[in-house]
Amino acid sequence: MHKRQKKTITWIALYFSMRIIRHFATFPPKLITPCILASSPPGGTILDPFAGAGTTGLVAEALGRNAILIELNPAYVAMAQQRIAEASRGNHA
Ligand SMILES: C[S@@+](CC[C@H](N)C(=O)[O-])C[C@H]1O[C@@H](n2cnc3c(N)ncnc32)[C@H](O)[C@@H]1O
């Protein structure tokens, strides 16, 4: 894949991330999954001090871990809470 194509895909992903989740820099769940699996036992606790839209919390819950999330922006806190609540009801964001 050419560098220009990669840039285009990155911008498209960022655009949809902002349109759908409304946070500027959510990371894909697949990025955090190996970190959580490698750094905590089942039932363990994950700390994310820059939680954003709560992706770490979503993945932690899906992997049977607890999560402590810290986020500066109240709008993102609400977004994270909503995403995690929806995921708990089986409606993944
Ligand atoms: C790159 S985003 C994290 C995105 C997150 N990984 C996700 O998937 O949604 C970084 C977040 O850190 C938050 N932040 C920046 N400084 C902070 C601070 N001092 N304390 C808590 N949160 C902070 C920002 O508001 C921003 O939402």
Image (cartoon, grey):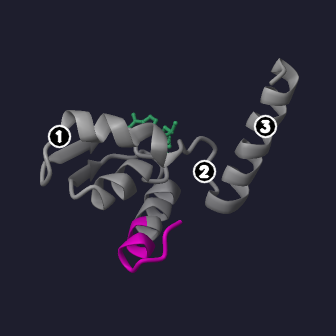
Q: Is residue 10 above or below residue 85?
A: above
Q: Secondary structure at mark 3?
A: helix
- Chain part drawn in magenta: 84-93
Q: Residue drawn 42% across and 45% down?
A: 72
Bin the neighbour count of mark 3 within 10 Å (Cα to Cα): few under 14, some 14-19, many 20 and up.
Answer: few
- Which residue matches tag 2? 23
Element at label 1: loop
Label 2 crowd bin: few (<14), some (14–19), many (20+), radius 10 Å: many
Q: Is mark 3 within 8 Å of ligand 1?
A: no
Crowd around label 1: few <14 · some 14–19 · many ≥20 (10 Å): some
Disc 3 and disc 2: Cα gap in Å? Answer: 18 Å
Residue 60 falls inside the magenta stretch: no
Q: First in sequence, mark 1 or 3: give its number.
A: 3
Q: Earlier in the sequence, mark 2 or mark 1?
A: 2
The mark that comes first in sequence, 3 or 2, is 3
Residue 9 is marked as 3
- Three-letter amino acid code at the position of disc 3: Ile
Q: Is label 2 within 8 A of ligand 1 (CB to nearest ligand atom)? A: yes
- Residue 40, given in percent of the width and then of the height, sits at 17, 40
Q: Pick the quarter of the image with the N terminus.
A: top right
Compared with 18, 39 (above or below) is above
Nearest to the observer: residue 4 or residue 76:
4
